[in-house]
Amino acid sequence: MAVADESRTVRFGIFEVDPRAGELRRNGVKIKLQEQPLRLLVILLQHPGDIVTREELREQLWPADTFVDFDHSLNAAVKRLRDALGESAESPLYIETLARRGYRFIQPIQSIAEEPSRLDASPRTSRKVHLHPAIYTVIGIGFALALFLGAYSWAGREHRNAATKKRIESLAVLPFENLSRDPAQEYFSDGMTDALIADVSKIHPLRVISRTSTVPYKGTKKSLPEIARELNVDAVIEGSVLRSGQRVRINVELIDADADRHLWADSYDRDLGDILKLHGEVAQAIAKQVRIQLATEQQARLRATPTVNLSAYEDYLKASFYMNQGPNYGNLKMARQFFESSVQKDPMFAVAYAGLAGSYLTLGMQRRISPQDAYRRAGELIHKALELDEMLPEAHSSLGDMTWQYEWNWQNAEREFQRALELNPSCMWAHQSLGWFLSWSGRREEALAEFARMRELDPAFPMRYEDLSGLHYHLRDYRDLVDVGLKGVALNPGEWSSHYFLGSGYLGLARKSEAISEFQKAVELSQADSDPVASLAFTYAVAGRRSDAQRILEDLKRQSKTSYVSPYMIAVIWSGLGDKDRAFEFLERSYEEKSSDLAYFLRADLRLDSLRGDPRFGELITRMSFPK
């Protein structure tokens, strides 16, 4: 076999490589190939038929001082090169893989030298050949015709390929691999995944699957086509993260899910302070690959991401990690601590302010802290986040929740949810909040449409029956509430809200003993959340077990001396016990403290049905100015 001269064009089969121009051509047509795979090909062509070891490739492609995960980067470069050459590792036409050793170029090659531009180079004669002018005309016409036919054929082929190429309209970002192999760094690789999902979700009109549906595939042995079918997506993004001190390297690959074919891959090496900008770069590259033209606003949004203090960003990732573990009190406390630390270290970090606001809102909705402590603090944080970044979808979604639950400004609440979805159409939490708001408003069809959209974005979302339960609860459709509640309990037997809604359905159908059983389970699983506790006490009271109801009421009174207890839930128990005056006393306290329970439950709560004929109830409804 010939040995390729590094400076000469080399031909093998239908391909040519021009090292000087940095081009790979197929039948004379340039093929797009990144620098690293092309350099790899040139090295192999310099040693045709010989094994080029992985160590030799490391020395030539990545100098010793280069920060890189060599194995992953080399494998990615080989994959991109094989894709360009139209071969696979299983059936190689050009590059043979020798496991754990290296690679070998197995096709004959031809080095193409530049020839002298004369018709007769023989030194034995000086006789010149004179051609008739007509011959030049014929040659010119033939050459032009060949060019035309070649161009026509190529254009037709490209047109057919473009016409048959499937447009990518949906994708899933699978959990990034933690290449450090240090379990203590899992929060970092998970955070990189979440951040990329957040940025890619801003690419309109691409549908991006939410993290709760992709997390189960972490470390999976399932094939990409199988994962894509389960998630109903066109493409999948895989990646890996390697962190070393204040540097991070992220490898990202975009894969056609049906064909299991690499469409694009790249590696990014950055300082951690620039990590937010990096995600914007990757999102823009992905938009280009899926053939979506970003609007000017979207481009500016992805480019304008600021730098961030390294320690602040780490605290933000740790806080997000705890938030993703589940909204129990312990996780929320840890998340809040890390978010607080993050904004203290970097007062310009808008996303951390939004995350901290979200932790306060959740604590308030779970009645772990008073409405004043939760919503007033959340409001300050949300407005700070929006002051730093007015286009932050998480902040607008949280503002919608706060405006709905605490400020009781129903129109502004819906407007903020819609604004969050304009900025990020794939934001699951904004869809969920809007869906619950529509359910609370009694807008059945709009709520169902919102929940259907949520299922598209998050097929594995475990709370889908809870969303439907909330709709039937507010519509007082108790038979449907029981049907959906049974499905929710079967799917999530350890989730207290599933038992709570099922118990509420039984209570609405006057099946009190079954309601008591479900409320008892909800109390146990929720660690005595005051809502299922109040429902259990209420049902005890209306079932004739007044002493059990009184015992729970006394427990809540003692608890209120050391921690927050919602006055609304106290009113519920007095309603069950038949003491209307005490019930209205605590409803009035709820109004004074701007309780989210009063805003959320009052209109549909069957536990207050005994109060609805009282003029005081109608006057309270009037003061609340609920939407029609």
Image: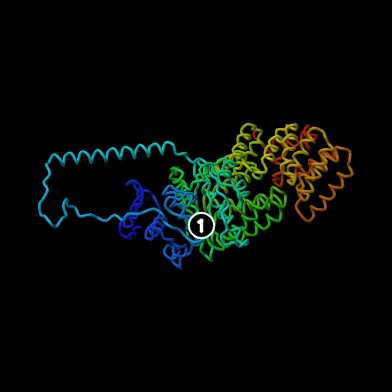
- Work out whether 170 lies above or below 44: above
Quadrant housing the N terminus: bottom left
The answer to whether residue 550 is seen in the rendering is yes
- The residue that appears at 39% across and 53% down in the rendered structure is 107
Q: Residue at x 51, y 47 (%)?
A: 200
> Colour scheme used in the picture?
rainbow
Q: Residue furthest front?
A: 124
Instruction: Pick the residue in front: 80 or 312.
Output: 80
Q: Position of residue 39 (x, y in %)?
A: 39, 58
Q: Is residue 435 left or right of residue 267?
A: right
User: Residue at the left extreme?
Assistant: 127
Residue 447's place in the image compared with 349, above or below, is above
- Observer able to see residue 628: no
Spot occupied by residue 464 in the image (x, y as percentages of width and height):
66, 40
Give me the residue at 34% from left, 38% from top: 155
Residue found at the very far bottom of the displayed protein: 64
User: Which residue does the numbered mark 1 point to in the structure image?
Assistant: 250
Instruction: Give the side of residue 445 with respect to residue 576, left or right.
Output: left
**SS for dot 1:** strand
Where is residue 442 shown, x and y percent of the image? 66, 33
Position of the C terminus by quadrant:
top right
- Residue 445 higher or lower than 102, as above or below: above
Residue 177: name its quadrant: bottom right
Q: Label 1 crowding class (10 Å Cα cut-off): few <14, some 14-19, many 20+?
A: many
Where residue 399 sits in the image (x, y, percent)?
60, 46
